[in-house]
Amino acid sequence: MKARLLLASLSAAFLAAFNGCGPEPLAGGTIETTNGIAARVVLPSGRPATNIKVFLLDEQDWLKKTKAGESIVMDSAETDTDGKFRFKDVDTNRTVSLYADVETYGMLIHSCTQKLVDVAYKGTIGMSKKVSYQGTIKDTTYKTEKILLAGSPFASEVDSTGRFIIKDVPQEYYSVVILRKLPNETHEYVVGENIRLDEWTEGKPTIITPDTTKAILIEDFEDLDNRNLLGPVFGGGWWDAINDYPADNATLLQPVNAAPQNFARAITNGGSEERARSLHVLYQAARSAPTAEPFVLLTSNLGAYNVHYNLGGMDSLTFFSGGSGRLTVELVQTNPAGSEVALEVIASKSFDLDSNGWTKYSIKPGDLGVTVGWFPNDPASFKAAFEKARLPAYTKKPGTWEEMGGMVTQIRFKGAGGAEFWLDHIRIHGITAGDLVK
């Protein structure tokens, strides 16, 4: 298996991969809890996993804490004689994972919430056999020192030939993070896409070829999921498709929303520059409003929900597209996470699409126009909330990209005036993934 990789610098917190095929969901009743996480844990035999430690891990700042030599454990609990455990007062503004192991069995659930436990696992989480992850890193430019599995305590040194092995890992999806040394003795991280570790992939060594360009590949739609390539690292990153509601002015569109099964239907064979796949979005005016200009808004948080990332050093943003009508690219600031500030600031650039095939479009910071939607009447009174969210300490509405401080939580693609557009290979140039969290 060959991982696509993004270049990242050593600067802050990365999040982990989405829950996927890790611990086996089993039938069972839910356990009532308020602002907490509670469940029952069982062994593969069906017997309760009694008197074992269950850990709540900090996915949001796992790399920052790992670099500082700090524990990523936020809390721990112990199962009772029926295998039940409970965490109280879990911070709902943070992304956490659930981890436990006993003898040869383990479990790890990324982006864990009580709703996930109740819906996907019916309140009962089955442990599975732990596996190993091994392979070779082929990098002739830099010296690779370490490999880590994002959002988890699992890591391994890399030998002089690039080989590594991480043992006793719970079966789950993970994002691979590589620590390497540059010629100037500084360190940076290469961050990869999801890998699936289970009993079928164990014993099949992977080959990782890091990307050495100073750029961030946001999305190439080569997989069929509804998550951008930063999502498994920062947490979040989900795509969504929104039409021009309310209903009396609605647009019909495909994908109808970003549920995985719907989003996958919009992935089409054939991409830009002979790539395998791309995204194809269809939209048309509803019969109830045939004269209204239809539009569709394809949106993705760069990472965690309402967390702002630093694009201030961006040289350009490029993407491939084609279709009919116009496509507007929007870089958006929204309400700071955990605050009561109503905020929407959008930096954007519009393009007329070419219906004859793929065209590469490029946006430089000076090309962006800024519009302000929601904004507090007295922005100075929210200085603390702005600074906590790493936003500029606004005293007035921003009018330029520079005044926005380059801070962005969402990237949007708004199609209008046509019926369809294709999208592929979205890349930010001039910064690394680590710069996003400076």
Image (tube, grey):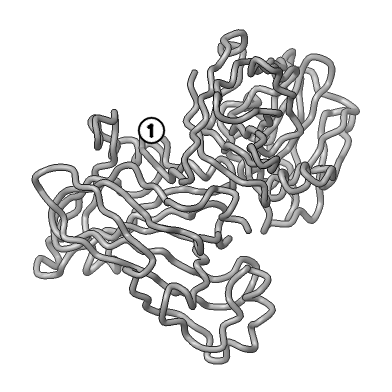
Q: Is residue 364 above or below residue 223?
A: below
Q: Nearer the viewer, residue 413 or 390?
A: 390
Tell me what residue is drawn at x 82 percent, y 35 percent.
54
Callout count:
1
How crowded pointer 1 is (Cα within 10 Å; few <14, some 14-19, many 20+) is rated as some
Give residue 274's quadrant in the image: top left
Q: How far across and how far down the image is residue 306, in percent?
A: 55, 62
Picture residue at 31% right of the left edge, 68% below the top:
367
Whole-percent x and y of residue 8?
58, 44
Q: Nearer the viewer, residue 269 or 212?
A: 212
Position of 401 compared to 76: left or right? left
Where is mark 1, residue-wise? 224
- Whether residue 414 appears in this view of the structure is yes
Answer above or below: position of 145 versus 184.
above
The outermost residue toward the top is: 203
364 or 230, nearer to the observer: 364
Q: Quadrant of residue 52?
A: top right
Q: Is residue 165 left or right of residue 305?
A: right
Q: Is residue 421 left or right of residue 124?
A: left
For image coordinates 29% across by 69% down, the residue present is 246
Image quarter in which the C terminus is found: bottom right
Residue type for callout 1 = Leu
What residue appears at the point 76 percent right and 33 percent down from the top-left corner? 153
In x, y percent, where is residue 32?
A: 73, 47
